[in-house]
Amino acid sequence: MGMNAVYNGAEDCPPVIAVFPLGGGLLLPRGQMPLNVFEPRYIAMIDDAIRTHRVIGIIQPEPESGRQSATPPLLQVGCLGRITQFAETGDDRYILTLTGIARFRVVEELAVTTPYRQCRVSYDTFTADFEARAGEDEVDRNALLKALRAFAKASDLKIDWKGVNEAPNEALVNALSMMCPFGPREKQALLEAPSLKERAEVLAAITEIELARGGGDPETTLQ
């Protein structure tokens, strides 16, 4: 899914962003994340984003924080996404798609009057995210697919192998990272992997660990 806006570097991204805390959620550069937004505070966040720069940050809360707090502590790295599809449902919900732009590191969470949270962020650690398909040639595609096939067989996953085989390395690694049924810590490790090559290696390693544990969700479909 393309974007009308062009993001060539950190200078094209806002230094202060609204953040959507989403446990187990993973958005990566040029990946697509569907969202069903219904809480009033996040409806307000989307309204404000559409009126301004059309971007929000996806970030995980601390996994150990539980659901007791309305403002759980945030992990330090998330991903900025642009609203590239948007629909109103007629029952006070928004259905939208975010397309990932670049990862960010939280500098500070701001004291705000908005119902949603906002952070000052830096993109400086992740300048390679602005270059599409950077590092693709370094990915060990065969090792990744071997691990994926074994995981799919053990977990009875339905996979669109035609799509997998046709996907370039960046799209393949990032889509599998976002879709695979792993926990919040594993998702964060995939997000924070410095390069595409290292993300592929982390993905293969996590898959092998899950295989050893006999893990996997048999109801999951990857496509």
Image (tube, rainbow, N blue to C red):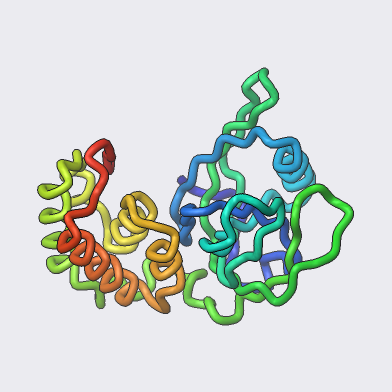
Q: Position of residue 219 (x, y in %)?
A: 26, 36
Q: Is residue 223 above or below residue 128?
A: above
> What residue is shown at x 34% (from left), y 56% (from top)?
182
Regarding residue 132, the answer to whether it shows in the image is no
Q: Is residue 80 above or below residue 41?
A: below
From this viewpoint, which residue is outermost toward the right?
A: 113
> What residue is shown at x 46% (from left), y 45% (from top)?
1
Regarding residue 107, the answer to whether it shows in the image is yes
Direction from residue 113 to residue 14 in the image, left or right: left
Q: Position of residue 61 (x, y in %)?
A: 58, 60
Q: Position of residue 135 (x, y in %)?
A: 33, 75
Direction from residue 42 to residue 34 in the image, left or right: left
Direction from residue 75 to residue 205 in the image, left or right: left
Q: Which residue is at the front of the view, 34 or 113?
A: 113
> What residue is shown at x 86% (from left), y 59% (from top)?
112
Q: Is residue 125 above or below residue 37?
A: below
From this viewpoint, which residue is outermost toward the front?
A: 68
From this viewpoint, which residue is outermost toward the top?
A: 90
Direction from residue 211 to residue 169 in the image, left or right: right
Q: Position of residue 189 (x, y in %)?
A: 41, 70
Q: Is residue 72 above or below residue 108?
A: above
Placement of the C terminus among the 4 image quadrants = top left
> What residue is shown at x 56% (from left), y 35% (from top)?
36
From this viewpoint, which residue is outermost toward the bottom?
A: 125
Tally of numbered discs = 0
